[in-house]
Each structure stands twice: as C-alpha cells, then as structure tokens.
Image (cartoon, helix red, strand yellow):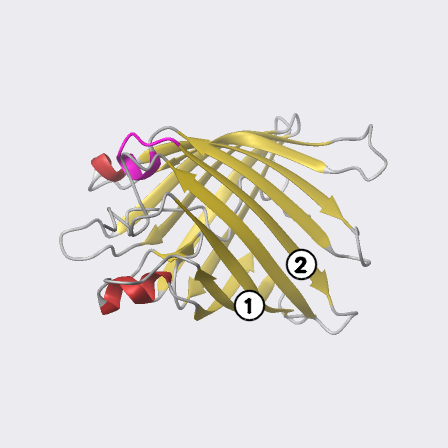
Amino acid sequence: MLKKLFAVTTLATMSGAVFAADAPALPFGLSFSGSAAVTTDYRFRGLTQTENDPAVQAGFTLAHASGLYFGLWGSNVNFGSGTPSLELDPSLGYATTLEAFSSKPTLDVGVVYYNYPSATDLSWVELYGKLGFKSVIAEGDSILTNLNYTNDYAGVDADSWNVNVGYSVPFGSSGFGGVAAVGYTVVDEDKYTFNGDDNYVDWKVGLSYGFKSIPGASAELAAVGTNIDTDGLSDVAERAVDTGAVFTLTKTF
C-alpha cells in the first residue's frame, strides 16, 4: 500500500546555502540572497507535491562571513482533499570551501524542517550534508552530492536515508546547458512503503537556459521520474510518480 505518498517535501530548487555574487552588503559580516520560481509541477525526489499542478516558490538565505546561514523557503502544495496548502521550510547550516584540497570543493552541512503550518503532524526534520565540485569534467560544470537522514520521514517516525548526485554543464557561451541528477531513497518498511517497496530511485534529465539580458534569470525543461511500481495505483497516484516534463522559471537575487 502507498502510505502517505504525497506527504513528502523539499527545498526543491534552493539548497541550503545560496550566496549570490551581487548580494547586498550588510553589517556584521552578513549577506542576503534569495530566489523566486514558477514551476509546472513541484517535484521532490521525483514525487509530485502538487498533484502535478503548478507551484509558486520563493526563499531567502541570510549568511554570515563565518559560513553560518539561515534559510527559509516556501511553496504551495497539494496532497489531496483535506491536506495542507502551504509548505514553509526553515533551515540552519554551515557552508565553507575546503581549501586544503586542490579541487577546493564546497562543504555544506545543516538541518532543515519540512514544515506544514496547517498540518504539523506531517512536518519532519532532516539532516543533510553536501559536497560541491566545480569544473570537474568540463569548464564551468558542477557536481553536487547530497547525503540526507531523518528518523521521522513524512512525519511517521520512520528512519530514512537519501543520497543524490546532480550534474550541470554549460554549452559554451550559448546560455544553454545540460542538467542531470539521480537519487536513491530508502525507508523503514515497517512504517512506510512506496507501493510495497522500502526504496526507490528518482532521476532528472533536462536542459537549462540563462537569460543574458536578465541577470539571475533562468529556465529549465526536464524529464523527472521514479522507478516506483504503479501496479494497483489510481490514475492520480500513478501520475505522481511516473516520468513527466517539468518546466521551471527561476530568478535569483
């Protein structure tokens, strides 16, 4: 049985720390950055959070020169009749560049609270660690690896691990680029399953475009999906996990 399949949330397009190069200067070593996005389908680790309907999303990060930061991200959600309509996720973390390594990767560790103000029984806390690498295979590309853990997945007191690897690469100076990601999630099957399985794989493959005339503005068209077994699911539940096209417009500041 698909237990509370839709009761899963994310930071989505905004990871723990977002530091814009032109962020306004603030006193006490602080800096501010943020993002706003419109997407045709809010997907978290391959699973729709809006019953495949559009979402409007926004977030900000207040960071200190020491590497400490506080973030807040929000989106509309729809898990079906009688479920919450708003997700509001605070996060607290630390980000730094590992100067001792020749590749100078970025390390980001922290905690995020996936929060539904009108349905706190669905809210849950997750720990995360991320490593980011630049210009690994091609000039200007990036690799981001994530490791996430919670003992309260989807608010059902279930242990869960998630690993994810994402890759992006620019296509020269055209403004276009490629994006790809693959993730693996496993949960305590005694308390939660994905249509009978305790694990699943999700993926994303697509194209991105950065608007040269609008700094910080970008578009992405990607195929997003999972390998969750859809036997016996309703049409709505099947579309929630099947591969679908997702178009997103984002503006960072």
Q: Position of residue 108 (x, y in %)?
A: 61, 34
Q: Is residue 41 left or right of residue 178?
A: left
At 46% from the left and 32% from the top, the residue drawn is: 149
- N-term mark: 1 or 2: 2
Q: Which residues are magenta?
A: 153-159
Of tags 1 and 2, the one toward the viewer is 2
Residue 45 lies left or right of residue 5; in this view the side is right
Extreme bottom residue here?
Answer: 174
To which quarter of the image does residue 205 belong? bottom right
In terms of secondary structure, where does tag 1 sit? strand
Q: Residue at x 24, y 47 (%)?
A: 4
Q: Which residue is mark 1?
A: 220
* Mark 1, other Cα within 10 Å: few <14 / some 14–19 / many ≥20: some
Nearest to the observer: residue 195 or residue 209: 195
Residues at marks 1 and 2, CA–CA distance in whole angstroms: 11 Å
The quarter of the displayed image where residue 177 is located: bottom right
Q: Is residue 56 left or right of residue 34?
A: left
Q: Amino acid at mark 2?
A: Ser
Asked if residue 19 can be seen in this view, the reply is: no
Identify the residue at the far left of this view: 82
Image position, residue 178 (x, y; %): 66, 66
The residue beneath circle 2 is: 168
Whole-percent x, y for residue 146 in the image? 57, 41
Q: Are marks 1 and 2 in contact (CB under 8 Å)?
A: no
Q: Is residue 233 above or below residue 144?
A: below
Residue sitting at x 62%, y 62%: 179
* x and y percentages locating residue 14 in the rendered image: 51, 49
